[in-house]
Each structure stands twice: as structure tokens, then as C-alpha cells.
Amino acid sequence: MRSFSCIDISSSNAHKPISLYLIRPLEMAPITSTAALLCSSTPSISTPSYSTTFPFNFSFPSKSPSTVNFRANPLPAVNAATSDHVLGRRGLVLALTATLPWMRPFSECTAAKAAESDGSEYELMKEEIRKVVTKGKAAGVLRLVFHDAGTYQIDDNSGGMDGSIVYELDRPENKGLKTPFKILEKAKSEVEAVHPVSWADMIAVAGAEAVSICGGPTIQVPLGRLDSKEPDPEGKLPEETLDASGLKQSFQTKGFSTQELVALSGAHTIGNKGFGNPTVFDNTYFKILLEKPSSGSMIGLPSDRALAKDDECLSWITKYAEDQNLFFEDFKTAYLKLVNSGARWKSL
């Protein structure tokens, strides 16, 4: 296997939204990257003569095999006729930026691709979603996301953000989700009058818009998920009665850390669980948890109250209660990881 060097040509493309890097093969050791929801509850410049595929292992959970193959589309930013330095015999321009140390996380790269090549599709989805999702309906839509993606399991690559929730609406743990499903069904039909869209993409974008509608962070969701043709295995969502230890263990099986568990749990700040204004996405959830509401109170689920009894969780609860911007940033990151969990992707 060959590794690849990257020559930054971003200075000549400063007007582009992302940096461009030239990838050229080097004879050296291969570089590989080994990479590797909430609770169940009831509602209360490739050349034309060839194409090259590069395998990378990404850190987010994936339902497809552990190696994610993708290929770059031709990019008009470089003139092949006048720049043989830029395009050698096996040269290829990829939209990548540094993390290892030269590659952005996949979700960020794909989000950038979505913004460029699928911009009109994304905007249409957002427009139709906002026609039907109000602040009062946002919590149900966000719950739909967690119950679709939250079935993911690392050990057998099952479940995840695959639109299978459409086959699972009659399960006890999904009681109440038919309403947000029907809401999105209307938006999806309007989008599909222009071009097809998967349920997995539709639900992922709808959840992000639900957060934004209620005043939370803006989340740009990558597009390209494929839908499952069958339901996910049963019994994979965390039970609402779990204690903190059980919750952490459950989330670990899905590839999420304690910090990500706490950040994602902050989604309960909207809805009818008693954490402040039910239509405002903020850090009130964490402030109220610091008050340690009693088990007999009507505030939150048992699993919410359990978090405040765990020292590791309490540390993150305290940080988010004190810094809403930190919560927003961490929630955004964890949400993107969630909606990529178990996803199978179209070829880029």
C-alpha cells in the first residue's frame, strides 16, 4: 500500500470554502488510521482516463466494513492543461485538511461536500422541514433521531442511523413517534417531488433543524446516507431506568464516551420533561440537574437524575451548567457523530 504526501495549494484557492491538497504517492511505509440516543422512553481533479480510490479508517462508527472507501470528484479549481506540477501521472486533488496531521474528520469533510455539491438539496430539505416543524414539535422530532440512531452497536455493526425507524414505530419504546414521523413524511414528499432523499438523511437533518429552531447551535449535517430495508434488532436502546453505570456502559457499546453521553442527554432540555422552557434549547437541563431533583419529582427521567449521582457525569454537568457555549459545541460534535453512527453512504 502506498502513502501520500500533501502539498498545500490553498493559497491559490483562497476563495474556496476549504483548502485543496495535492495527493502524490511516495514510496514509504503505509499510513493507516485504526478507528475504532438517548434512552428508550415513552412520551410523558481526478483525470478522465482513470479513477483512484483511497481507503481510510475513520473514528466514527460505521455500519459498512471498517474501511470506508471514497473517491474524489473532478474539481475545476486546478487547470490540468497548465499545471503538470499539480497533476502528475497519478496526481489527484482531494478536499482534505489537517488532522493526521493533514486530514479533517470525515464528517467535516463530508459536510463541506454537502455544502458545495448538495447545497440546493440541503436548503430544500431545511425549507420543507421548517414548514412543518414548530418549536412545540421539535422535541418529538429530535427523539425520532435518537431512536433511529441509538440502536447502533459497535460489536456487530448493527443498527444506527439508517432510517429503519420507519419499520419500528409500533415497538413499545417508540410509542409517540408516529406523530413526528408523519410530520416529516409531509416534508419528505415535498423534497422528493424535486429529487429523492433517504429517510436517514431526512431525519438527521430534521433533528439538527429542530435544535436550531429552538435556539440551539446550527448543525450542518452531511448527506448521502442509505436507508435500511429492514428493522434494526430490538432491545438496543438504553432503558430509561438505568443508573449512571448502566448508561455509561450502554453508550460505550455504541462508541460514545461519558462526556458525549452527558452532552447528548442535554437534548432533554426541550420537551415536557420539566427542564425549563420546553421550547428553548439551552443549558437549563444541567443547571436543574445540579439541584439534584428528588426521585419523586416530575423532573426528567430516572436516567437523567442518575447522571447527577455519578462523579464523572457530574463533572461534565457542572461544566455545561456554567458554560452554555461549551455545551453547544460539544452537543454539535456529539450529534454529528450520532447521526453518522452505523450509516451506510452513497459513493461520493
Image (cartoon, helix red, strand yellow):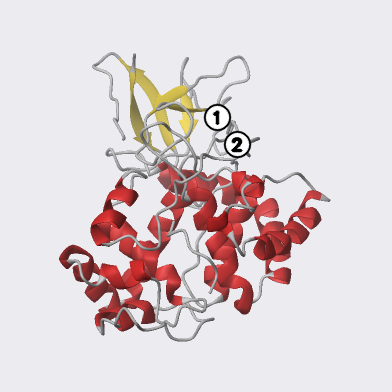
Using residue 117 as the reference point, say whether residue 286 is left or right of it: left
139 w.r.t. 109: above or below: below
Q: What residue type is labelled 2?
A: Pro
| Mark identifier at residue 203 | none
Q: How crowded is mark 1: few (under 14 residues within 10 Å), some or many (20 or more)?
A: many
Looking at the image, the residue that sits furthest to the left is 311
Q: Please tell me whether mark 2 sits on a helix, a strand or a loop.
A: loop
94 w.r.t. 322: above or below: above
At horizontal 31% and vertical 56% (from top left) the residue drawn is 247
Give the residue number, with chain letter if any, for mark 2: 76
Location of residue 118 in the rendering, given as x and y in whole percent from the top left corner:
65, 47
Q: What residue type is labelled 1?
A: Ile
322 w.r.t. 112: above or below: below
At horizontal 29% and vertical 25% (from top left) the residue drawn is 32
Q: In which quarter of the image is the C terminus?
A: top right
Location of residue 73 in the rendering, given as x and y in whole percent from the top left corner:
58, 31
The foreground one among 127 and 305 is 305
The foreground one among 156 and 331 is 156
The foreground one among 78 and 171 is 171
| Mark identifier at residue 45 | 1
89 w.r.t. 36: above or below: above
Location of residue 242 in the rendering, given as x and y in whole percent from the top left corner:
33, 60
Residue 105: quadrant of the picture: top left
Q: Distance between the residues labelled 1 and 2?
A: 7 Å
Using residue 158 as the reference point, say whether residue 245 is left or right of it: left
At horizontal 40% and vertical 54% (from top left) the residue drawn is 238
